[in-house]
Protein backbone atom coordinates (compact mmCIF):
# COMPACT_ATOMS: atom_id res chain seq x y z
CA UNK A 1 0.00 0.00 0.00
CA UNK A 2 1.31 3.44 -0.88
CA UNK A 3 2.13 5.73 2.03
CA UNK A 4 -0.01 8.81 2.49
CA UNK A 5 1.80 11.93 1.33
CA UNK A 6 2.74 14.12 4.31
CA UNK A 7 3.26 17.34 2.37
CA UNK A 8 0.97 19.81 0.58
CA UNK A 9 0.50 19.31 -3.14
CA UNK A 10 0.79 23.03 -3.92
CA UNK A 11 4.57 23.15 -4.24
CA UNK A 12 5.68 23.92 -7.80
CA UNK A 13 8.03 20.96 -7.54
CA UNK A 14 7.94 17.50 -9.01
CA UNK A 15 5.74 15.57 -6.60
CA UNK A 16 7.64 12.31 -6.98
CA UNK A 17 10.86 14.15 -6.13
CA UNK A 18 9.28 15.73 -3.03
CA UNK A 19 7.99 12.33 -1.91
CA UNK A 20 11.47 10.83 -2.28
CA UNK A 21 12.86 13.62 -0.11
CA UNK A 22 10.22 13.20 2.59
CA UNK A 23 10.46 9.42 2.62
CA UNK A 24 14.21 9.70 3.15
CA UNK A 25 13.84 11.49 6.50
CA UNK A 26 10.30 10.85 7.74
CA UNK A 27 8.22 7.77 8.44
CA UNK A 28 5.11 7.03 10.48
CA UNK A 29 4.94 10.56 11.84
CA UNK A 30 8.51 10.81 13.08
CA UNK A 31 12.12 11.24 11.99
CA UNK A 32 13.88 8.21 10.60
CA UNK A 33 16.94 6.91 12.43
CA UNK A 34 20.23 8.08 10.94
CA UNK A 35 21.14 4.60 9.76
CA UNK A 36 17.87 4.32 7.82
CA UNK A 37 18.30 7.56 5.91
CA UNK A 38 20.81 5.97 3.57
CA UNK A 39 18.29 3.35 2.48
CA UNK A 40 17.29 5.18 -0.67
CA UNK A 41 17.47 3.68 -4.13
CA UNK A 42 20.23 5.28 -6.25
CA UNK A 43 17.80 5.95 -9.09
CA UNK A 44 15.41 7.73 -6.68
CA UNK A 45 18.27 9.82 -5.27
CA UNK A 46 19.38 10.84 -8.76
CA UNK A 47 15.79 11.68 -9.72
CA UNK A 48 15.35 13.90 -6.64
CA UNK A 49 18.64 15.70 -7.33
CA UNK A 50 17.70 16.25 -10.97
CA UNK A 51 14.37 17.77 -9.87
CA UNK A 52 15.77 20.04 -7.18
CA UNK A 53 14.54 18.46 -3.94
CA UNK A 54 17.74 16.69 -2.89
CA UNK A 55 21.33 17.82 -3.20
CA UNK A 56 24.79 16.21 -3.19
CA UNK A 57 26.73 16.66 0.05
CA UNK A 58 28.69 19.90 0.27
CA UNK A 59 31.65 20.96 2.39
CA UNK A 60 31.24 24.29 4.17
CA UNK A 61 33.79 26.43 5.98
CA UNK A 62 32.85 29.06 8.55
CA UNK A 63 34.38 31.93 6.57
CA UNK A 64 32.76 31.00 3.27
CA UNK A 65 29.36 30.52 4.93
CA UNK A 66 29.44 33.94 6.58
CA UNK A 67 30.51 35.63 3.33
CA UNK A 68 27.75 33.88 1.37
CA UNK A 69 25.12 34.74 3.99
CA UNK A 70 25.97 38.44 3.92
CA UNK A 71 26.01 38.51 0.12
CA UNK A 72 22.62 36.80 -0.16
CA UNK A 73 21.15 39.26 2.36
CA UNK A 74 22.37 42.12 0.20
CA UNK A 75 20.60 40.64 -2.85
CA UNK A 76 17.30 39.77 -1.14
CA UNK A 77 14.36 42.15 -1.19
CA UNK A 78 12.55 42.76 2.12
CA UNK A 79 9.11 43.16 0.55
CA UNK A 80 9.40 39.92 -1.36
CA UNK A 81 10.18 37.87 1.75
CA UNK A 82 7.50 39.71 3.77
CA UNK A 83 4.91 38.99 1.08
CA UNK A 84 6.03 35.36 0.91
CA UNK A 85 5.66 34.98 4.68
CA UNK A 86 2.13 36.41 4.60
CA UNK A 87 1.13 34.26 1.63
CA UNK A 88 2.45 31.15 3.39
CA UNK A 89 -0.22 31.60 6.07
CA UNK A 90 -2.96 31.40 3.45
CA UNK A 91 -1.47 28.80 1.13
CA UNK A 92 0.49 26.58 3.52
CA UNK A 93 3.52 27.05 1.29
CA UNK A 94 6.12 26.29 3.95
CA UNK A 95 9.02 27.17 1.64
CA UNK A 96 7.77 30.77 1.62
CA UNK A 97 7.76 31.04 5.42
CA UNK A 98 11.34 31.00 6.67
CA UNK A 99 13.07 33.52 4.34
CA UNK A 100 11.70 36.43 6.42
CA UNK A 101 13.45 35.34 9.61
CA UNK A 102 16.54 34.31 7.66
CA UNK A 103 16.82 37.72 6.02
CA UNK A 104 16.38 39.58 9.31
CA UNK A 105 19.22 37.60 10.89
CA UNK A 106 21.44 37.85 7.82
CA UNK A 107 20.99 41.63 7.57
CA UNK A 108 22.49 42.04 11.07
CA UNK A 109 25.24 39.47 10.69
CA UNK A 110 28.72 40.94 10.27
CA UNK A 111 31.84 39.37 8.82
CA UNK A 112 33.90 37.80 11.58
CA UNK A 113 36.47 35.11 12.20
CA UNK A 114 35.70 31.89 14.02
CA UNK A 115 36.13 32.26 17.77
CA UNK A 116 35.14 29.81 20.48
CA UNK A 117 35.58 30.16 24.24
CA UNK A 118 34.53 26.57 24.97
CA UNK A 119 37.10 23.93 25.81
CA UNK A 120 36.22 21.78 22.79
CA UNK A 121 35.98 24.82 20.47
CA UNK A 122 33.30 23.30 18.25
CA UNK A 123 30.99 26.27 17.67
CA UNK A 124 31.56 29.97 17.04
CA UNK A 125 30.65 32.30 19.92
CA UNK A 126 29.38 34.88 17.44
CA UNK A 127 27.18 32.97 14.98
CA UNK A 128 26.95 29.52 16.54
CA UNK A 129 28.28 27.68 13.49
CA UNK A 130 30.97 25.05 13.31
CA UNK A 131 34.36 25.93 11.87
CA UNK A 132 33.99 23.29 9.21
CA UNK A 133 31.22 21.07 7.81
CA UNK A 134 32.76 18.27 5.71
CA UNK A 135 30.32 16.54 3.34
CA UNK A 136 27.33 18.26 4.94
CA UNK A 137 23.87 16.83 4.29
CA UNK A 138 22.14 19.62 2.36
CA UNK A 139 19.02 17.64 1.59
CA UNK A 140 17.92 17.59 5.23
CA UNK A 141 17.79 21.38 5.14
CA UNK A 142 15.33 21.20 2.28
CA UNK A 143 13.25 18.65 4.16
CA UNK A 144 13.09 21.01 7.17
CA UNK A 145 12.27 23.90 4.86
CA UNK A 146 9.40 22.16 3.06
CA UNK A 147 7.92 20.37 6.06
CA UNK A 148 8.34 22.92 8.87
CA UNK A 149 9.19 26.22 7.22
CA UNK A 150 12.71 25.71 8.54
CA UNK A 151 13.93 25.05 12.07
CA UNK A 152 17.40 26.66 12.02
CA UNK A 153 16.42 30.22 11.23
CA UNK A 154 19.44 31.81 12.99
CA UNK A 155 21.98 29.42 11.48
CA UNK A 156 24.05 30.94 8.64
CA UNK A 157 24.43 27.40 7.32
CA UNK A 158 20.64 27.16 6.88
CA UNK A 159 20.20 30.83 5.91
CA UNK A 160 22.49 30.51 2.89
CA UNK A 161 20.55 27.48 1.69
CA UNK A 162 17.12 29.00 2.33
CA UNK A 163 17.75 32.38 0.71
CA UNK A 164 19.43 30.76 -2.29
CA UNK A 165 16.33 28.58 -2.81
CA UNK A 166 14.08 31.61 -2.37
CA UNK A 167 15.85 33.37 -5.25
CA UNK A 168 15.03 30.34 -7.43
CA UNK A 169 11.41 30.13 -6.29
CA UNK A 170 8.18 31.49 -7.71
CA UNK A 171 6.45 34.44 -6.02
CA UNK A 172 2.98 34.55 -4.45
CA UNK A 173 0.04 36.26 -6.10
CA UNK A 174 -1.30 39.50 -4.65
CA UNK A 175 -4.46 37.60 -3.70
CA UNK A 176 -2.46 35.09 -1.65
CA UNK A 177 -0.62 37.92 0.07
CA UNK A 178 -3.85 39.73 0.94
CA UNK A 179 -5.48 36.58 2.28
CA UNK A 180 -2.38 35.85 4.33
CA UNK A 181 -2.33 39.40 5.66
CA UNK A 182 -5.85 38.95 7.00
CA UNK A 183 -4.81 35.73 8.75
CA UNK A 184 -1.69 37.39 10.16
CA UNK A 185 -3.61 40.35 11.55
CA UNK A 186 -6.00 37.94 13.24
CA UNK A 187 -3.06 36.18 14.87
CA UNK A 188 -1.72 39.53 16.13
CA UNK A 189 -5.12 40.58 17.46
CA UNK A 190 -5.58 37.23 19.20
CA UNK A 191 -2.15 37.50 20.82
CA UNK A 192 -3.21 40.86 22.25
CA UNK A 193 -6.27 39.20 23.78
CA UNK A 194 -4.28 36.55 25.64
CA UNK A 195 -4.54 36.64 29.46
CA UNK A 196 -1.80 38.49 31.33
CA UNK A 197 -0.20 35.28 32.60
CA UNK A 198 0.18 33.86 29.09
CA UNK A 199 3.54 33.05 27.54
CA UNK A 200 5.04 31.96 24.26
CA UNK A 201 3.59 28.45 24.55
CA UNK A 202 0.14 30.05 24.55
CA UNK A 203 1.04 31.81 21.31
CA UNK A 204 1.88 28.40 19.83
CA UNK A 205 -1.53 27.04 20.81
CA UNK A 206 -3.23 30.17 19.48
CA UNK A 207 -1.49 29.91 16.09
CA UNK A 208 -2.34 26.22 15.92
CA UNK A 209 -6.02 27.05 16.41
CA UNK A 210 -6.06 29.86 13.82
CA UNK A 211 -4.20 27.91 11.14
CA UNK A 212 -5.42 24.41 12.07
CA UNK A 213 -1.71 23.58 12.16
CA UNK A 214 0.31 21.05 14.14
CA UNK A 215 2.55 22.09 17.01
CA UNK A 216 5.72 22.07 14.88
CA UNK A 217 4.36 24.53 12.35
CA UNK A 218 2.85 26.75 15.05
CA UNK A 219 6.07 26.72 17.05
CA UNK A 220 7.96 27.79 13.94
CA UNK A 221 5.72 30.83 13.46
CA UNK A 222 6.13 31.87 17.11
CA UNK A 223 9.90 31.54 16.77
CA UNK A 224 9.93 33.60 13.57
CA UNK A 225 7.98 36.36 15.37
CA UNK A 226 10.60 36.30 18.11
CA UNK A 227 13.55 36.43 15.71
CA UNK A 228 11.90 39.34 13.87
CA UNK A 229 11.51 41.23 17.20
CA UNK A 230 7.71 41.16 17.12
CA UNK A 231 7.65 39.02 20.28
CA UNK A 232 10.73 39.99 22.28
CA UNK A 233 11.65 41.36 25.69
CA UNK A 234 13.92 44.28 26.65
CA UNK A 235 16.48 41.85 28.09
CA UNK A 236 16.23 39.37 25.22
CA UNK A 237 15.67 41.21 21.94
CA UNK A 238 15.16 39.78 18.49
CA UNK A 239 17.41 40.41 15.51
CA UNK A 240 15.64 43.26 13.74
CA UNK A 241 17.83 46.01 15.25
CA UNK A 242 21.00 44.11 16.18
CA UNK A 243 22.64 40.71 15.98
CA UNK A 244 22.69 38.77 19.24
CA UNK A 245 25.78 36.59 19.54
CA UNK A 246 25.20 32.88 19.93
CA UNK A 247 26.94 32.92 23.31
CA UNK A 248 24.31 35.39 24.56
CA UNK A 249 21.20 33.51 23.43
CA UNK A 250 20.17 32.21 26.82
CA UNK A 251 17.31 29.75 27.26
CA UNK A 252 15.31 29.51 30.52
CA UNK A 253 16.55 26.73 32.79
CA UNK A 254 13.05 26.42 34.25
CA UNK A 255 10.46 25.79 33.13
CA UNK A 256 11.86 23.72 30.29
CA UNK A 257 10.86 24.87 26.84
CA UNK A 258 11.09 23.61 23.27
CA UNK A 259 11.03 27.18 21.99
CA UNK A 260 14.17 28.97 20.87
CA UNK A 261 15.67 32.36 21.67
CA UNK A 262 14.24 34.96 22.06
CA UNK A 263 10.52 34.06 22.00
CA UNK A 264 11.08 31.55 24.81
CA UNK A 265 11.33 34.57 27.18
CA UNK A 266 8.22 36.38 25.95
CA UNK A 267 5.25 36.88 28.26
CA UNK A 268 1.98 38.66 27.54
CA UNK A 269 2.92 41.82 29.55
CA UNK A 270 5.81 42.37 27.12
CA UNK A 271 3.22 43.05 24.44
CA UNK A 272 3.50 43.04 20.67
CA UNK A 273 6.23 45.19 19.11
CA UNK A 274 4.27 47.22 16.57
CA UNK A 275 7.33 49.22 15.62
CA UNK A 276 8.90 45.99 14.38
CA UNK A 277 5.69 45.03 12.57
CA UNK A 278 5.58 48.35 10.73
CA UNK A 279 9.21 47.90 9.68
CA UNK A 280 8.58 44.38 8.42
CA UNK A 281 5.18 45.01 6.85
CA UNK A 282 4.87 48.74 6.00
CA UNK A 283 2.20 47.87 3.43
CA UNK A 284 -0.06 46.79 6.32
CA UNK A 285 0.21 50.10 8.16
CA UNK A 286 -3.52 50.82 8.38
CA UNK A 287 -4.38 47.32 9.59
CA UNK A 288 -1.54 47.39 12.09
CA UNK A 289 -2.57 50.81 13.35
CA UNK A 290 -6.02 49.41 14.10
CA UNK A 291 -4.47 46.50 16.02
CA UNK A 292 -2.11 48.81 17.89
CA UNK A 293 -4.97 50.98 19.09
CA UNK A 294 -6.59 47.88 20.55
CA UNK A 295 -3.43 47.03 22.55
Image (cartoon, rainbow, N blue to C red):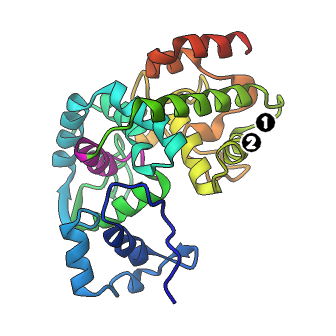
Badges 1 and 2: C-beta atoms under 8 Å apart? yes
Residue sitting nearer the eye, 213 or 114:
213
Examine the residues drawn in magenta and state their main secondary structure: helix
Q: Position of residue 76 (x, y in %)?
A: 26, 31
Q: Tell me what residue is drawn at x 38 percent, y 55 percent.
A: 11
Disc 1 is placed on an element classified as loop
Q: In screen coordinates, is 259 left or right of 8?
A: right
Q: Tell me what residue is drawn at x 66 percent, y 12 percent.
A: 290
Q: Residues within 10 Å of mark 2 (few under 14, many from 20)?
A: some
Instruction: Answer whether residue 177 is visible to the viewer in this image.
Output: yes
Q: Position of residue 231 (x, y in %)?
A: 60, 30
Q: Residues within 10 Å of mark 1 (few under 14, many from 20)?
A: some
Q: Is residue 97 above or below residue 122?
A: above
Q: CA distance from mark 1 to mark 2?
A: 6 Å
Q: Position of residue 222 (x, y in %)?
A: 59, 41
Disc 2 is placed on an element classified as helix
Q: Tell me what residue is drawn at x 27 percent, y 67 percent.
A: 54
Q: Quadrant of residue 252?
A: top right
Instruction: Answer whether residue 232 is visible to the viewer in this image.
Output: no
Residue sitting nearer the eye, 128 or 157:
157
Q: Is residue 128 above or below residue 273?
A: below
Residue sitting nearer the eye, 199 or 20:
20
* Magenta span includes 150: no
Q: In screen coordinates, is 42 left or right of 1?
A: left
Q: Tell me what residue is drawn at x 56 percent, y 27 percent.
A: 230
Q: Position of residue 87 (x, y in %)?
A: 47, 37
Give the magenta range: 151-168
Q: Which residue is mark 2?
A: 202
Q: Which residue is mark 1?
A: 198
Q: How many marks?
A: 2
Amino acid sequence: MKSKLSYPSVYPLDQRAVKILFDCYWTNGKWKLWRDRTLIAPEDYEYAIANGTMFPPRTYSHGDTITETIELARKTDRKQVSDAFLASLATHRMDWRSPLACLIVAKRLRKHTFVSSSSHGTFCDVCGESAYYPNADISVLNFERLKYGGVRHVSPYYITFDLARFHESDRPSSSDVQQGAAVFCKIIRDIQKLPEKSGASDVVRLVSKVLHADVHESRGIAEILGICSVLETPEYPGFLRRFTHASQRDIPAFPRTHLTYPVCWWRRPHGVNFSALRTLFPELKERLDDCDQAE
